[in-house]
Amino acid sequence: GTPRRAMLPANDEGLDATLDGVIGDGENDGLMELESAGVGGEESKPVAAGGLCSCLTVGYYQPYFDIDTVDVYRRLKSTVTFMKDEETFLTSVSTKPDAYGPFWTATTLIFIISATSNISRYLAKGYNYDFELVSFCMSFIYGYLVVLATALWAAFTYFVKLPVRYMSLMCLVGYSFALYIPCTILATFSVLSWPSIVLAGVGSTLFVLKSIVPVISARKEKAVTVLSLLVAAQAVFMLIIKFKFYSHSS
């Protein structure tokens, strides 16, 4: 037979009642805001063949590297302008987090620290290239990126009980490294070593906090613990960079 069309009520009250039944009564407004920040729901994962071992294939992660350079530039720019941006970084990447930016930001930071720390050592003590600094720097930066993102994900999932998408957190932490790049270049000169690295540490921490605080504020009783540990971890990261790579400049 002919398909029947659903008719909306003719009066305004009936229309409002119908929409209320579809949209809800407003109690879930906070949840909808958290969803926009990458909280809750299922993370869209790439479809890859291989069953349980699909996460070990390159194809599984390929979609996270499928991003325009314009988007990467915009995200890098937001690490500097985040205090003026109305939308938090975590919200802006919630629909399409990427691994390309975090990977190359971390890789660039490794290269810059390895180069400038050896240049700084040369200026202070003469030529004395230390290759061990390069290998340590690589393990340290990549390791911190993975460990901090994983720790935040675990804290949100099991402690705060507000699941946040892992790749969104990886994206947030990875891009926060961008603030260290110009500052570690300045740290080559002994007089700028402490100020530049402290500036990078504070800026990077504030960048992460601006995205984390609006989400975790929904669980105020547990927010202090998570935020305190985050700030402590960022402070330790900053101090290791200073004393391991630029202590000879003091």
Image (tube, rainbow, N blue to C red):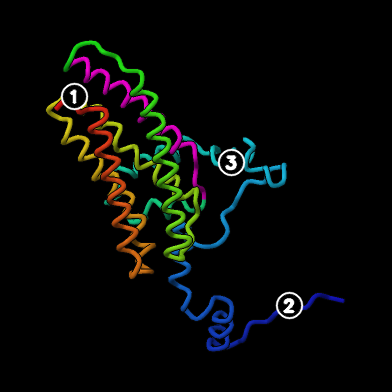
Q: CA distance from mark 3 to mark 1?
A: 43 Å
Name the main secondary structure of what is drawn in magenta. helix
Determine the residue positioned at 29% across, 14% down. Answer: 129
Q: Position of residue 181 (x, y in %)?
A: 30, 32
Residue 10 x/y as whole percent? 60, 87
Marker disc for residue 5: 2
Whether residue 124 is situated above or below residue 19 in the rendered picture: above
Q: Which residues are magenta?
A: 96-123
Q: Residue farthest to the left? A: 191
What residue is disc 3 on? 63
In primary-sequence order, the first of circles 3 and 1 is: 3
x and y percent of residue 21 in the render?
58, 81
CA separation in Å, label 1 and label 2: 78 Å
Q: Amino acid at mark 1?
A: His
118 in the magenta segment: yes
Taking the view exactly as shown, the residue that stands out farthest to the top is 127
To which quarter of the image does residue 249 belong? top left
Q: For the C terminus, which image quadrant?
A: top left
Horizontal side, residue 107 vs residue 127: left or right: right
Density class for disc 2 (Cα within 10 Å; few <14, some 14-19, many ≥20) is few
Assign a secondary structure to mark 2.
loop
Mark with earlier residue (1, 2): 2
Q: Is residue 226 depicted above or below 20 in this figure?
A: above
Q: Residues within 10 Å of mark 1 (few under 14, many from 20)?
A: some
In the image, taking residue 161 as reference, residue 58 lies left or right, namely right
